[in-house]
Image (cartoon, rainbow, N blue to C red):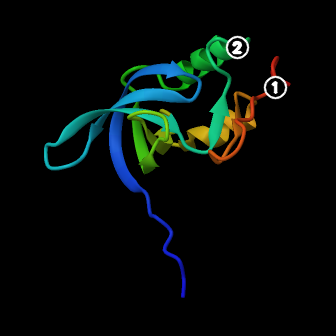
Amino acid sequence: MSVPVPAPFLYNGQVIDVHDGDSLRVYVDRGMRDYSVWPIRLLGCNARELSMPGGPEARDELMRRLPPGSAVVLATVKPDKYGERKDAAVYYATPDGVVHDLVAELIANGWAAPWDGNGTQPVPEWPRP
């Protein structure tokens, strides 16, 4: 017997604003003229908190990559354990049409640490390597 793995729901959206290095608000097109504003927690990573050294810089880096109005695709997996946010992978395309996995990029560039949501939250090194 196999255990079913939850498949993500895919939604098109537009970034409204960035809260910190691993969360943002998105205007989501749920289809059939059904729109919502969702707070999103980036799935699979943890960034430095705004109150920590490097926290404002992590937020600014996320804002640089996804300024308000940026088109994104959300792959939502589950509600976040803290509040009303939804945990989601986020994908975006650059003007040349290349699709990017936001979390993979933030981790590769030292802005976020990989984290599956279990145990103690890892904190990315600061200053970044």
**Residue, x 68% and y 43% (percent of image)?**
115
- Amino acid residing under circle 1: Glu
Q: Which mark is residue 125?
A: 1
Within 10 Å of the Cα at label 2, are there few (<14), some (14-19), or many (20+) other Cα atoms?
A: few
* In-front residue for pair 118/13: 118
Q: Do the residues labelled 2 and 1 touch (CB within 8 Å)?
A: no
**Residue, x 37% and y 52% (percent of image)?**
10
Left or right side of 4 for 32 = left
Q: How far apart are marks 2 and 1 (CA)?
A: 11 Å
Q: Please count the marks in the image.
A: 2
Q: Give the x, y percent position of residue 29.
A: 25, 41
Q: In which quarter of the image is residue 38?
A: top left
Q: Which residue lies furthest to the right in this view?
A: 129
Left or right side of 37 for 78 = right
**Residue, x 34% and y 37% (percent of image)?**
13
Q: Residue 52 carries which label?
A: 2
User: Visible in this render: residue 81?
Assistant: yes
* Residue 3, above or below 116: below
